Image (tube, coloured by chain):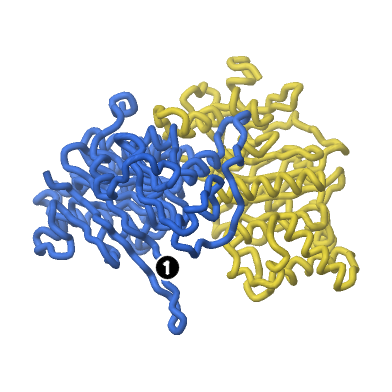
Amino acid sequence: MKHNVDRKSKDNILDVHGLSVVYDIGDSVINAVTDVSFSVGKSEKVGLVGESGSGKSTTILAILKLINSPGRITGGSISLSGEDVSKFSENDFRKIRFKDISFIPQGAMNALNPVMKIGEQIGDLFHPHGFLINKQEKYQRIKEALNSVNLESEVANLYPHELSGGMKQRVCIAMATILSPKLIIADEPTSALDVVVQMQVFETLEELRQKIGASVLIVGHDMGVMAQFTDKIGVMYAGELVEFNDTAGIFNSPLHPYTARLIKSLPSIDNRGDLVGIPGIPPSLSEPIIGCSFAARCSVKLDLCDSLKPDYVLNDSGHYVACHLVSNGLSKP
Amino acid sequence: MTNLLEATNVSKTFSTGLIRKSINHALTDVSLAMGKRDPTILAVAGESGSGKTTLARILLDMTRPTSGEVFYNGSSIYGLSNQDYTSYRRDVQAVFQDPFEVYNPFYKVDTVLKTPAKKFGIGETERQRQLAIEEALDLAGLRPDETLGRYPHQLSGGQRQRIMVARAILIKPRLIIADEPVSMVDASLRATILKTLLDLNHKFGISMIYITHDLTTAFQISDHIAILYQGKIAEAGNAERVIKDPSHPYTQLLINSIPKAIPNAKWDSSSNKVDSAVHHGNGCSFQPRCVKAMEKCVNNEPPLYQIMDDKAAKCFLYDKLPIIDNRDLSKIMLKKTFDREKFVR
């Protein structure tokens, strides 16, 4: 995919440019992420959506420098506020984790240390990041952090197993915001929670995010959550970013046929409607994809889609899409 | 007319702890029925811990209830003759949540289809069984040549879940109990699998109990919805009325919490009251979280009130309306409520 998408700028909190990640499994190479570029602006909430195996989680693991063998980054750059962090050593990156870039994991159930009290786990964040504060001040900060996510101060003295799933996820949010990072990355933060708790968790996250003015990059497959929470959405398919636009645009005027079909397949609570899925399955990532990765499932494909990878088409408002229908003027960006 | 499958006043308690026993009421006094005349789809919805999976396990005779009974064709399933028990086993089939854990990785997927076909005498020869299997796979939206002869790890999650659907239809059951069949499947496949279930109901007259935490998909395919809260039915009745005009404050909260895939329809948290307090009193179990709770809700448990012909809710807000017994409630949910013709093609 050729890139005419270069929005690198000092004003962006995060710039991912041409990122590719592979996993070496036995003799084969799985192309998990191929040539992905996008940016997250200041105070912006960006969502990455896609099915399992589309590369969305791998993308954020790469940003967090958490790709370990058998995974390997084969290309691209990742900049945080204009500074290329992909070249950072593990030690240097450790200093910015939680301080500049924090993470809310998917399984809050397993993310906390089961043999450490909640307060101690939160308190552990201060020292490595140069916050040399005394015991009393530390206790005060921990108390404030717990209160900020609507938990009582006493939770500091509990072990993770004594908390419900929603409470554990709140602890993770408290940890992700306590050092006021510029960017919070969240991987399906509420997929294990019930809808009521999910709404509460997102309200808490949004309240805190506004207070510290952070940007959020969130990964998920629940299009409802994405519609409610994000400002912009990137749609991933078979390791590629096929469309990127503001949230209203993605839902109201999707350009890529995959995005359009995905939106159409969502059941609604307002009307009983036709249930239309997308026939077929995504291509295997262990073989190079010739042509457009969605061509095999696309109902409106052209002949050239099977043989030629589409370039990105970009319009002024930062909406971009990789589809021959758009680049040939058959549907307009 | 006797019902195909009926649970009457079923309760299940689990006790934990050796010295200080604590008792967990997973399910309290639930009745529901699936009739013979109309093949209907009943959704049982609730959050985790609401007792919905316990209910499924009781209906499938994988767990015995602490009290109450399950009837198949009018006789208790706990006293069936071997022959009748086999026909219950054939008539009532299950599709489970996790399409990864139900397979033995050492066997080809053919095994999960051939074993029940043999057991329940589908076809007389190997060849007939093979044809029946291929037909079932086809109905579930799979191509037999791409599926048979493979190992589970060679298939995607959606394909594996559809094999489970194929296995359920191969046996030509009267009722499929599907416990969260699409919660682990990607959005693009979810609609396809739900449509397959609706098709089976319409074309082959197979009734369905669809157990889910997702009210949106429940609304899409079911005639009736029963909302469970902490093991009790909070509201139940015609799906359209439960979703469009929810009566119980818990149902209202659930529906308002659904994140709509419409960017400008924002979440409404007005019916939400954060309270982590676990309920200990004798009153309504939803009372600690209820924005409309009244004094009497603390110590008195509300009965089911009949809100409309085909809907009831367990809430004192409706205490001017007639009380309905939960077995009568299960009877008003035996008819189809919407025309499938429009949705299956």
Name the residue: 22% across, 38% down.
B39
| Chain letter of the residue beneath label 1 in the structure image | B
Decide: few, some or many residues near mark 1? Use Cα within 10 Å; few <14, some 14-19, many ≥20.
few
Residue A305, x across and y down, in percent = 54, 26
Q: Secondary structure at mark 1?
A: strand
Query: In this rendering, does residue A79 appear at all?
Result: no
Residue A8: x percent and y percent?
A: 82, 36
Q: Horizontally, is B50 left or right of B293 in the view?
A: left
User: What hue represents chain A?
Assistant: yellow
Q: Amino acid at mark 1?
A: Asn
The residue drawn where x is 58% and y is 20% is A325
Residue B239 appears anywhere in the view: yes
Q: Quadrant of residue A124?
A: bottom right
Residue at which label 1 appears: B24
**x and y percent of residue A229 in the render?**
65, 39
The chain letter of the blue chain reads B
- Placement of B6 over or under A283, stated as above or below: below
